[in-house]
Image (spheres, coloured by chain):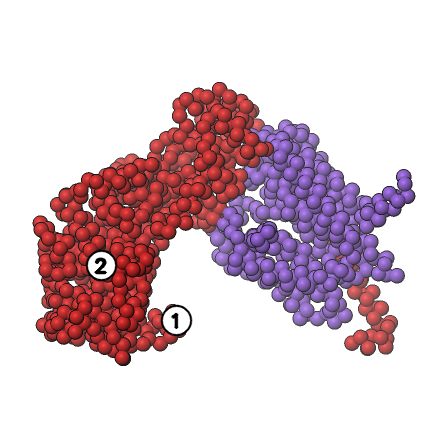
Chain colours: A purple, B red
Amino acid sequence: MHPAIRRLAYSLTRQIDGALLGIVLALVALGLLVLVSASNLNAARVTGQAANILIALGLLWLFANIPPHYLMRLALPLYVLGVLLLLAVALAGDAVHGARRWLDLGITRIQPSEFMKIAVPLALAWYFDRHEKTLRLANYAVAVVMLVIPVALIARQPDLGTAVLITAAGFFVLFLAGLPGRVIAGLAIAAAAALPLVWSALRDYQRQRILTLFDPSQDPLGAGYHTIQSMIAVGSGGWFGKGWLNGSQTHLDFIPERTTDFVFAVFAEEFGLLGCLLLLGLYLAAISRGMLITANAPTMFARLLCGAITLTFFTYAFVNMGMVSGILPVVGVPLPFISYGGTALASICLGFGILMSVNNHRKLVQT
Amino acid sequence: MSSELSINPGIELRNAQLELHHFQVRLAIAAGFVLLAFLLLAGRFFYLQVVRHGELYTLAEANRISIVPVTPNRGVIVDRNGVVLAHNYSAYTLEVKPDRIANLESLINELATVVEITPRDRRRFRRLLEESKSIGSLPIRTRLSDEEIARFAAVHYRFPGVEINARLFRQYPQGEVFSHVVGHIGRINQREVEQLQEEGLTANYRGTDYIGKTGLEQSYERTLHGTTGVEEVEVDSGGRPVRTLSRTPPVSGNNIALNLDARLQEVAYNAFGDRRGALVAIDPATGGVLAFVSKPGFDPNLFVDGIDSVNWNELNNSPDKPLVNRALSGTYPPGSTFKPYMALAGLAYGKRTPQQTIHDPGYFMFGGHQFRDSHPGGHGIVDMYKSIVKSSDTYYYMLANDLGIDAIARFMAQFGFGSRTGIDIAGEAAGVLPSQEWKMRRFNQKWFAGETISIGIGQGYNAYTPLQLAQAVAMLANGGVAYQPRIVNAVEDYRTRKRASVEPRRLRALGLKDDHLAVVRQALIGVNKEGTGARSFAGAAYVSAGKTGTAQVIGIKQGEKYEESQVQEELRDHSLFIAYAPAEAPRIALAVIVENAGFGARTAAPLARKVLDYYLLGKRPRPEQRSRVNDASSN
């Protein structure tokens, strides 16, 4: 190979973590394979998703090349901008399908809540890093407020799935930043005590979703239908699955939202327990790699950010598979790298890019 | 802090290492949690896919049984005499499943070679596509002819994801005449999906594509919709239905019968000609609404299968604002139709006796400002009877000044001015009954005594809906009892045909003195006999009571003269009339406003005469006026 080309190739790829990229590529390939079946061989969907994947990988590369201290400088402005955008959405947003999530900028429309999935952990990590030497309980209180403001705005839109994910991401930062064990225990007890209150504050349909979790047969036309059908799909897969393109649940239209939130049911039906364990293994590998990077990260900021990115990724996977297999209530959280759709994919790849960047800059900072 | 640390770098290092250690402990806990969670998932998969595999596999195989919702028939809407205002008919539609199709545009072009697809169909389809998020199938063509069905059936195999379905369609045979009161249905949008979810009605709307959007279709949605049935259907391996296993039949929605009289409504609607305006007629004994007209209307049938963008823009951007329900949400100054109530207030508060006279020189001076009478030179000596019959402004400038704004507001509130009537369709405006408190709240300003003067002749901040004007005149007609206006008369069970009447809802008795009321009612009869309404009611075969009104749209400056011919059409005065008849035992009370049509006596009063003539005598207006509107509604 010509040395110039080699130099170029090196400079383009030196920031990329081979192991993590390998896992990501394996997952998106698996995702495309499932989508071919789930979409009933719909070429438009598959090529559309392929385009989404290319864009997301581009973002991954881009963020892998941004040194962490640049991100740190951007943390607070990005957070403030995000909150302002959320406020703007609440006041003047476009109601698409009833929920106010989009902001029309004239040229393009943006969905600030998605952006906050990165901006919130970024800001919290920055905040703890700043107060690293003098951390007191009050700092945790401030961090909680910084978390609650965007979460409340997003929950009001209403976008429960995103609110849950951002809460999780924020909580991970707090936890990793050393939120005292007794505070966590206290919060847990308070939450348990507040459960009856929460129950009474829930809307009827939200209660229905939780009741359905315990007895899906209660409401076969309504809320239980998704859960019953996806559990049947998963269970009928058995050890080895029915084979690609052969899932009867999938192809007879029994699985709702089968390319997006319930795509795991398609996967489990066609690839069986072995396929599911393989998928769990891939996720676990990605999470392990992320945690390794987190453990070796040079600064508090980098540690907290990487930890939050890794654990949020875990939350995506766990909540989605838990919901499809009937152990968690139905919330709109996609299965990372497998569900059809570009937004979540982009924000996950962006996070993985940050992981790679941190991994590359640890030596530079330490020496 | 930093200086302290630099003195003893050992502590900093230890702290940092300790912290790192703490962090790693935390990370390890998190890792343990991740492992645990994944073990839980793996266990769950094992449980479903191995332990329960046999059972669930059988279920999946048996999942050749598909649960299909059976949509109930929507209830029919009829007028008081059984004339159909909204009903259903069955027709075949060509439907496309957008999420199964790669290139919609080329598919539609291909379909257009088989069945006719107009540009309007395409626009409508595009709009539907934008509004709905790939839920099921969307109609590209409705009302297919038998020939088109046969043609498509022959080439069906070329179009996977396209199918023909028999559907029930809503139709409004009376077209624009009832567009604002009956309203229309339309495809359920995402906001309505969420609302149904919140109300726990999602299951009952499975299989339903349409929901009431406006008017009675919206306010009686629950009644009209019915209960969705469930059918268990066995399907073959390709998913096509083979046979029905069990069936819980749907329960059709109930029908509703209105107090409205379709022919009266039509007469009233057509009487407006090309004018804009509104008319509300009420049965004073019950509050039942006999006619509820907002002109211009629009063809509600356009909205049923989704309106296309061209028609929508035309309706939405028209300067005549046909989509606005003027009778319900338009607010207008009542003009001189306010005077009878003012007279009653004068009597009730002891500020005037019927015999007391004033001198009307043609103006009233207050605070150096001249309030002019619309009759140049004035009416001379005026008592209460004459003040109403000849519509003296000066009399009411003085009376308003003597009463004060808060007494006026208190008295008028009983008649329902400035508050929603609670009629059984949504979107009602409250209007404005001005008072000191209102002005403080609205503008954060004190009330000026000079502002009270023009309130007396129904100008100034006064702004009421035609519905409120009709409700108020119905109270004059029935001796001072407030009923809630009701459009629906009865709900009819679809099966037993048994009617459950909506009982008239008596809100309150006003406690007006009989002799006070008699004075005003006598004067209202005088208006139509020898006053401002006399020309319009000449030769009527019944005795009627009425009051003309003219509401200013623009302010006239001091010393300036209003010349109708020199003012733009949309700035000309509104023409108003309130009436009830027969005067001795009223069967109908009405309020009519004709926008920018000048003096009440000239446009609104003759229009009211036509409506009363038809309702009381069955007299139809001259035919040439009807045919014009019929042409417009038939396309």
Q: Left of A17 or right of it: where is B517?
A: left
Q: Amino acid at mark 1?
A: Phe
How many angstroms separate mark 2 from mark 1 (CA)?
A: 31 Å
Q: Relative to A38, does residue B480 appear above or below in the rendering? A: below
Give the residue furthest to the bottom: B367
Q: Left of B77 or right of it: where is B22?
A: right
Quarter-of-image position of residue B104: top right
Q: Left of B455 or right of it: where is A161?
A: right
- Give the residue number, with chain letter if any, for mark 2: B599
Q: Position of residue B497 (x, y in %)?
A: 26, 37
Q: Left of B39 or right of it: where is B68?
A: left
| Mark found first going from the N terminus, 2 or 1 | 1
Q: Quadrant of the N terminus of chain A?
A: top right
Nearer-the-camera pick, B370 or A367: B370
Task: Estimate how packed mark 2 is, as few (under 14), some (14 to 19) or many (20 or more) residues with alpha carbons within 10 Å.
Answer: many
Quarter-of-image position of residue A19: top right
| Residue at the image point whose x is 53% and y is 22% from the top | B157
Task: Estimate how packed mark 1 is, as few (under 14), some (14 to 19) or many (20 or more) residues with alpha carbons within 10 Å.
Answer: few
Chain ID for label 1?
Answer: B
On residue A160, the disc is none
| Residue at the image point whose x is 61% and y is 38% from the top | A259
Secondary structure under the numbered disc 1 in the rendered image: helix
Give the residue furthest to the top: B154
Q: Quadrant of the C terminus of chain A?
A: bottom right
Q: Position of residue B385 (x, y in %)?
A: 11, 67
Chain ID for label 2?
Answer: B
Q: Amino acid at mark 2?
A: Phe
Give the foreground label among 2 and 1. Answer: 2
Secondary structure under the numbered disc 2 in the rendered image: loop
On residue B443, the disc is 1
Whether residue B139 appears in this view of the structure is: no
